[in-house]
Image: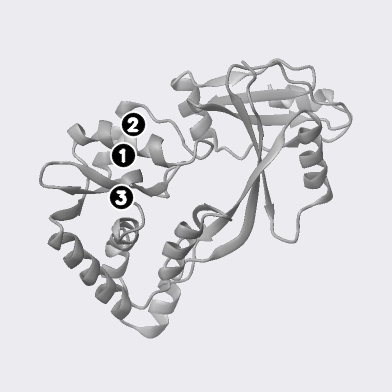
Amino acid sequence: MVKEAKAKFIEKVFTNCYLLPAEIKRLIALRNFYQVKTEQGLAFADDEGGYYYLFLYVDMQKPLILPPLEKDILVENVYYDGRKTEIQCKFEEYVQNAGCIFLNTYNAVTDRPQLTPEKYWKKLETLQNSLAAEGKKISIPTEQQLKQFEEIYLETIDKYVQKRYSKKERKTQRKLGYLHCIDDKDGKIYAIHISGLLHGGAIATRKDCQGGIYSPGLMLYIFKEYYEAMPQDDHAQKEYMRSKGIGGWIAVDNKASWRIHKMLGITATGKSMNQFVIKTTM
């Protein structure tokens, strides 16, 4: 469909779709991927439950007209800081002319902490001792805890960041070690972490428990294997700690998250993403 659309346009087609083929196939298999009717190029919608995540293939010489939908529509534009191209600026103006309103900016962050091993193990021990004193621990949630895990995710993570996974997929993610939580002996969960390897990776503390050590504790713990595999040789260690890619995205105004990441030496990469939204009137 994309190839056919590109062949029809005289001007170069612009797209904000960065999804890998495997992710699109996953969404199609879950029946969460739709084509949106429009006369201006192609528009695809990923149904994330609370909103539609919109991907466009358009000739911006023609105005974009979208039909009213029953959920909010989210459009994103990814760019390098200080190097946003003319066509990317034009695209942002283009979607705003179609009714989108600027929502927020997210910065990509590095994937590897820069905290020295000595400081890391000291901080982890202190936090784990504090959790133990409260009768809590860090663990992979059980299958029985997944419902509670998902409820905390939906309650605390910003609506336009949430990604919807099926129960079967969450069970698989649990088995692969992509999910962690802080819980107590009764199985009550206080904070959650979803690996940044997944689209929609996140860390969050339950709303009635925020402001404490739970999220920092989880952030430290998930890098335990990383530090256990740390080379002893200085040169090898420096190469090992070098960032290999993007480790996630943080809203520019999320001070709590920035504070936690900076504790580990995780910083912005220079790549950002602007979000635009059309609120449903239905």
Mark 3 secondary-structure assignment? helix
Q: Residue at x 32, y 65 (%)?
A: 226
Point out residue 233 in the picture as x, y percentages from the top left corner. 34, 83
Dots 1, 2 in contact, CB < 8 A: yes
The residue labelled by disc 3 is 209
- The foreground one among 214 and 75 is 214
Give me the C-alpha separation between circle 3 and circle 1: 25 Å
Q: Which residue in the protein does label 2 denote?
A: 169
The amino acid marked with disc number 2 is Glu
Quadrant occupied by the N terminus: top right
- Colour convention: one colour
In this view, 14 is above or below 251: above
Q: CA distance from mark 1 to mark 2?
A: 6 Å
Which one is nearer the viewer's eye here, 23 or 179? 179
Task: Say whether residue 151 is left or right of residue 28.
Answer: left
Instruction: Name the residue type under label 1.
Output: Gln
Q: Report whether 197 appears left or right of 81.
A: left
Residue 244, x across and y down, in percent: 49, 62
The residue mark sitting in front, 3 or 1, is 3
Among the 4 quarters of the image, the one containing residue 59: top right
Q: Is residue 214 above or below residue 52?
A: below
Q: With respect to residue 259, does 53 lie above or below?
A: above
Q: Which residue is mark 1?
A: 173
Give the CA separation, mark 3 to mark 2.
Answer: 27 Å
Give the percent coordinates (x, y) of residue 138: 21, 54
Q: Residues within 10 Å of mark 1 (few under 14, many from 20)?
A: some
Q: Earlier in the sequence, mark 3 or mark 1?
A: 1
